[in-house]
Image (tube, coloured by chain):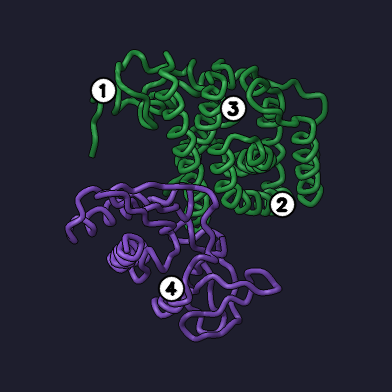
Amino acid sequence: MNQLINYTLHLADTTLIIAQRNSEWCAHGPILEQDIAITNISLDLLGQSRNFYQYAAKLINAAHAPFPLEREGGEASEDSLAYLRTEREFKNLLITELPNGDWAQTILRQFFFSVYQYGLYEQLHKSGDEQLAAIAEKSLKEITYHVKWSSEWVIRLGDGTEESHTRMEKAIKALWQYTGEFFIPANFEKEVFSIDYEVLKKNWQTKIETVFTEATLSIPENVFMHTGGKTGNHTEYLGYILAEMQHLQRTYPNAEW
Amino acid sequence: MQNGKSMSEKEKILSILEEVCDPEVPVLSILDLGIVREVKITGDETEVVITPTYSGCPAMDAISIDIRLKLLEHGYKKIKITSILSPAWTTDWMTETGKRKLKAYGIAPPQYSNKGEENIECPQCHSINTKLLSQFGSTACKALYQCLDCKEPFDYFKCH
């Protein structure tokens, strides 16, 4: 049970943090339509994350798990899980917490992530856990748009001007080293479902290659891959995100509006 | 007898739910939109089961409150609102009346063709000479199109 809770929190944290990062573009997008697009994607991801947190809270309360919220004395809820856990308790993928960088880097991260998320949720849909399957089924419809939108942008920028191409290359250099974590399961992942990571990785690589070829971009080779996010060992960036996201609830506990 | 009574009670509740509108697209009732999945009556408790259009749809919280208020207004006391995710909502559940209302309101309703979501009919001048401006429009459920004849931009309710 505890591993299922960990797994659900990992899915919740990952979608929450990338939603939070994308939302930083609100009112700063390069043009209005794309500002709306990235914030819409952010909203989809936040909605998915709420579904996972609600499920995690239900599991925690049902199991009377001495899970992270003992300190509050009350029951776990989607809000307490998002607002009152510390950096070490967050299990999101490292790539989601990295700063947005420029538009090229934001687009590339969304593309890498959406293609991975699509493949993973396809498998989750058949995982046998009824609620995770339902959330995956719902989310897949939304992710389909995210994959389409981000693929088109990778092609537009990669096969665009000299400057946009250079920026994409820079983004690849910055982000590629964080893509390995997608396919290296943490213990809780191995124990809960039999996700086929080989298939996941193969399908991901095929899609990336197809889009990169059209975008005249190339895949780097022999890159060291960072891991740790899934087990709470984060980059320095996560703490700053949480500080901004959580400060209101921590300063004025249970504040509502 | 008991069954007949609860059926008509359900119909009564459904007619009340017809008065609850989507706050983002106020011409559509939640029944037009196809998000009411079930009405259950157990003893003195009325349960309304709804499903979100999109995971992050901010209208869902407002809709839950509106359902509760509308039922309270009609004298129902014990009200439960449940949200379920599977099977996932699809625009196929939108009623034909709903689609007509959307169009009259200026939003192109979801439409399928063998070319996918192309040649979407302009809700203003009915031309199909239109183009996609952005896959993401003013809300998560809509895309932004422009009519190349009358030049008006318009919202299109995406197939989902």
**The numbered mark 2 sits on a residue in which chain?**
A
**Same chain, marks 2 and 1?**
yes
Q: Is residue B154 left or right of residue A180?
A: left
Label 3 to label 1, Cα distance in Å? 27 Å
**Residue drawn 29% across the image and 28% down it:** A248
The crowding category of the residue bearing disc 4, from other C-alpha atoms within 10 Å (few below 14, some 14 to 19, many at least 20), is many
Task: Quickly name the residue at label 2.
Answer: A155
The purple-coloured chain is labelled B
The quarter of the rendered structure image containing the N terminus of chain A is: top right
Which is closer to the viewer, label 1 or label 4? 4
Q: Secondary structure at mark 3?
A: loop
| Residue B23 can be seen in this image | no
**Same chain, marks 3 and 2?**
yes
Amino acid type, callout 1:
Thr
Q: Secondary structure at mark 2?
A: helix
Numbered circle sitting on residue B74: none
Amino acid type, callout 4:
Gly
Task: Quickly name the residue at label 4.
Answer: B98
Amino acid type, callout 3:
Leu
The green-coloured chain is labelled A
- Give yes or no for contact between labels 1 and 4 (Cβ–Cβ under 8 Å): no
**Residue drawn 46% across the image and 83% down it:** B124
**The numbered mark 4 sits on a residue in which chain?**
B
The crowding category of the residue bearing disc 1, from other C-alpha atoms within 10 Å (few below 14, some 14 to 19, many at least 20), is few
Is A113 situated above or below B95? above
Numbered circle sitting on residue A251: 1
